[in-house]
Image (spheres, coloured by chain):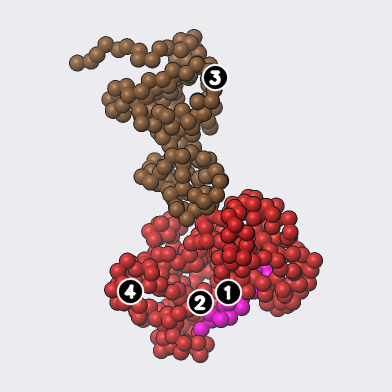
Chain colours: A brown, B red
Amino acid sequence: MKEPKQLSVSAIENGTVIDHIPASSLFKVIQILGLDKIDNQITFGTNLESGKLGRKAIIKLAGIFFEDDDINRIALVAPEAKLNIIKGYEVVEKSIVEVPDEIIGIAKCVNPKCITNFEAVTTKFTVVSKKEVALKCHYCEKITDQEHMIIL
Amino acid sequence: MKNRSLVSIDDLSTDEMVSMLDLAEEFEKQPSQSLLEGKVIATLFFEPSTRTRLSFESAISRLKGKIVGFTDASSSSVTKGESLYDTIRTVNNYCDLIVMRHPIEGSARLASEIADVPIVNAGDGANQHPTQTMLDLYSIRKTQGTLDNLNIFLVGDLKYGRTVHSLLMAMSRWNTTFNFISPPELKMPVEYKLYLDSLGLKYYEHSDFTEIINEADIIYMTRVQKERFSDPMEYEKVKNVYVLRKHMLEQTKKNMKVLHPLPRVNEIHTDVDTSTKSYYFQQALNGVFTRQAILTRLLDLK
């Protein structure tokens, strides 16, 4: 039996809705996109029921539209996230996030002997596999795989 | 050159590699030249490596360059807690090129992004040691007359051995056949085998020396270190399996040479030293010519 559909987070007039974020990744997404540092109106809901993810989160950002490069940075923590671009309360465009070719910051290099774990330096990776995400460290050249990935 | 630093062997195109080897040949003919006169080269050895340091310093001295630096981190301000960033920013002011060895992986890449002067990586932990690879290539080309269609045997610790990994990556640019001889615990990691598969290059794995070594053009020996074994019993079982003796070389090819990055412990018996097929000491000498070529090329002097 399906419950009647109801909006858990109120609608926005213009902006972006990021849906299908795993609930456990919500605050990481906020951090990666720097949403804690902007003045726009943001509403979010978390621990919402989701058939696909179990518990999902959703973020509605009034007056914000992302460039692909910016939004793709959340692919590591929310690979299934879906974007709805809203104009005049209508969804005018839908898109999905895509793992970028290069990851700057965001993830920690798994190699305990890597210089990025010793010096104050931003991590940098080349994405060598997108399906099962694998990152090659620009510095120590070691691979960090999905299983061992730690988000900074 | 696109990149003025040499951090990883992959930084070099095949053409750049070959051109550097050609230049090293010129230095072998005439090692004493004044190309580095008036230049100051910093040799920063955050961890001791006497052999590599002396080879670099010999190369610099033969080119009339001046050397500043330290031979281990205890005689630098690192012991006072200075960051690598600050050390490189500072030393950058004093010299025309920095040769650095550091125990932390990726340190040389970071240094190359901080410094205005070229960085030569003389080893960053278990990661890269490109000048070693260049001198290995030089030694192979010099003894075989080519880098193409060779059968290279890599022996010993193939799991952790930085030099064998870099050599494999470099030689895979040519049509090379590889034979890996190692204890099961220290086999060549799967990613390198997948890489060779992707290039369609042939490789064979063995757990001991057999008469197949008679097919070798190059036998590249490395040390099997006790501390690499989780079970000391395993080490005891294999420690004498990977020792090369002179009599084993009797039926090998005439052109075959035995290489070793040195220092050796017991994996090449001293009786091999008298064989015309031993080449590891000349290989060390080639390191000087190769480093002369690398230094002058990075400084755009030749």
Disc 4 designates what residue? B235
User: Given this view, does label 4 or label 3 mark the residue nearer the observer?
Assistant: 3
- Distance between the Cα atoms at labels 4 and 3? 63 Å
**Quick one: label 1 or label 2, which is nearer the N terminus?**
1
Please tell me whether the stretch drawn in magenta is mainly helix, strand or loop: helix
Disc 2 designates what residue? B263
**Is the Cβ of the residue at disc 4 closer than 8 Å to that at disc 3?**
no
Magenta highlight on residue A52: no
**Quick one: label 4 or label 2, which is nearer the N terminus?**
4
Camera-side residue of B180 and A78? A78
Task: Rate crowding at label 4 as few (under 14), some (14 to 19) or many (20 or more) other CA atoms within 10 Å.
Answer: some
In the rendered view, tell whether residue B135 sits above or below residue A17.
below
The N terminus of chain A - image quarter: top left
- Distance between the Cα atoms at labels 1 and 3? 59 Å
Could you tell me which secondary element the residue under label 2 belongs to?
A: loop
**Is the Cβ of the residue at disc 1 closer than 8 Å to that at disc 2?**
yes
What range is drawn magenta here?
B278-295
User: Given this view, does label 3 or label 2 mark the residue nearer the observer?
Assistant: 3
The residue positioned 57% from the left and 77% from the top of the image is: B283
Could you tell me which secondary element the residue under label 4 belongs to?
A: helix
